[in-house]
Amino acid sequence: MESIGPLMNVREVAHLVNASVERTYQLCANGTIPAVRIGRRVRVPREAFERLTTKHSLASARRSAVYPRPSFSEADIERLARALAASLAAAWRRRQKSLGA
């Protein structure tokens, strides 16, 4: 599926970003993916696409370094589960009371 030259078609870009062709057209139309129209065809400059993917890869790596995934202990999970159950029970009692049951 590798095209030769400086431009890629939307189907190739969709394959690279793991999206549908329709969604890729939307991303090109709203400017998220840089694209040019040549007649009725939409083409994506290879260099601009590579810069975009590199920029997003770096931003993603930076985000995961700044905001690491939290790790919860078993005690934390138990405490959260009890708090959620108590909150749901209280909401259920309020609802039943408002219905006059």
Image (tube, grey):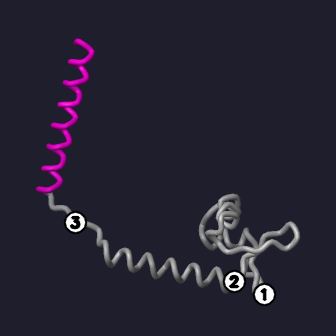
Q: Would you say 62 lies left or right of 29 here?
A: left
Residue neighbourhood size for the residue with mark 2, other residues' Cα within 10 Å, grouped as few (<14), some (14–19), many (≥20): some
Residue situated in front as seen by the camera: 74 or 34: 34
Identify the element where label 3 is drawn: loop
- Quarter of the C terminus within the rendering: top left
Q: Which residue is mark 2?
A: 46
Q: CA distance from mark 2 to mark 1?
A: 8 Å
Q: Nearer the viewer, mark 2 or mark 3?
A: 2
Disc 3 designates what residue?
71
Extent of the magenta region:
75-101
Q: Which residue is mark 1?
A: 5
Residue 89, image x and y in percent? 19, 31
4 relative to 18, above or below: below
Residues marked 2 and 1 touching at CB (< 8 Å)? yes
Task: Kindly identify the amino acid type of the residue bearing the numbered disc 2.
Answer: Arg
For mark 1, does the 10 Å Cα neighbourhood hold few (<14), some (14 to 19), or many (20 or more) residues? few
Q: Position of residue 76 (x, y in %)?
A: 14, 56
Disc 1 to disc 3: CB gap under 8 Å: no
- 101 lies left or right of 17: left
Dot 1 lies on which element?
Answer: loop
Tag 1: residue type? Gly
**Which residue shows up at 67% across the image and 64% down it?**
24
Residue name at image x 71 percent, y 73 percent: 12
